Amino acid sequence: MEKNTVELGAECVVEEPALLGRTYPNWRDPLRIGPHAIIRPYAVMYVDTTIGARFQCGYFCIIRADCWLADRVTLMSRVTLEGRVQIGEGTKVMAHVYLPTKTILGSRVFVGPGVTVLNDRYPFRRERAQVVVQGPTIEDNVTIGGGCTIFPGIRIGEGSFIGGGSVVTKDVPRETLAYGVPARHYPLPDHLRGGNRPEFLYPQVDLWGARVDPSWSPE
């Protein structure tokens, strides 16, 4: 008999048809989702993944195995986590974003719609023994504008701001403004300093229906 594939916390809302606990050969642990999650129809989430409290996702989200999501993460519709992805507390990922294997997002990160993240600079052009995939590491309080492309293996430093439509091919120092194709670096204006505002990221506001979140306050 197959062991349990899903462990749901208290007061989760799962709207059908969502597929939770999808298995694969030699899987180890159930999909674990913390309390007060909101999961919309057609989401697909694999075993061997852990998701924190007050998670919410839109329609057609895919979360493959070996992902780790902290509390209060929001994934909008048609976001794909391609396995072995880490996401920190309060991070919000907008619609139509692709995060490949071995991508790391810190806490209070905002990823705009249509962002594509890469993890291999030379796909299918190297010997198998030479292939080492590595997505980028995006540190806390980074904002990435819509439509950006983020190259493999780079690090985007804490508090940086990436302008929409940019192609980021190299490391971005902390608290830097970067934009362009390829992105160039500029001093971060004063009005963009201080990190992303938690009142826009932490409350579990249900964007698809009336709901309030009394569990979090900026004070």
Image (tube, rainbow, N blue to C red):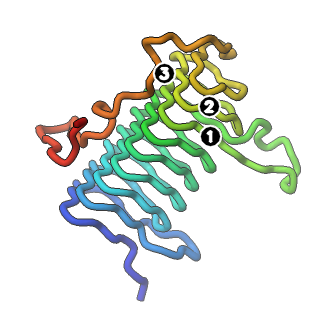
From the viewer's perspective, is residue 203 above or below residue 181?
Answer: below
Q: Are the residues at dot 2 and dot 3 in contact (C-beta closer than 8 Å)?
A: no
Give me the disc on residue 145: 3
Q: Quarter of the image containing the C terminus? A: top left
Q: Are the residues at dot 1 and dot 2 in contact (C-beta closer than 8 Å)?
A: yes
Camera-side residue of 207 and 73 = 73
From the viewer's perspective, is residue 186 above or below residue 46?
Answer: above
Element assignment for label 1? strand
Q: Which residue bears the numbered disc 1?
A: 137
Q: Which residue bears the numbered disc 2?
A: 156
- Residue at image point 36% right, 38% down: 76
Camera-side residue of 106 and 194 = 194
Kindly identify the amino acid type of the residue bearing the numbered disc 1: Thr
The location of residue 85, given as percent across then percent down, is 55, 51
Left or right, 119 with respect to 18, comes to right
Element assignment for label 2? strand
Q: Judge the density around disc 3: few (<14), some (14-19), many (≥20) Cα neighbours within 10 Å.
A: many
Outermost residue on the front side: it is 219
- In primary-sequence order, the first of circles 1 and 2 is 1
- Residue at image point 68% right, 31% down: 151
Q: How many numbered circles are shown?
A: 3
Q: Residue 174 lies in what quarter of the image? A: top right
- In primary-sequence order, the first of circles 3 and 1 is 1
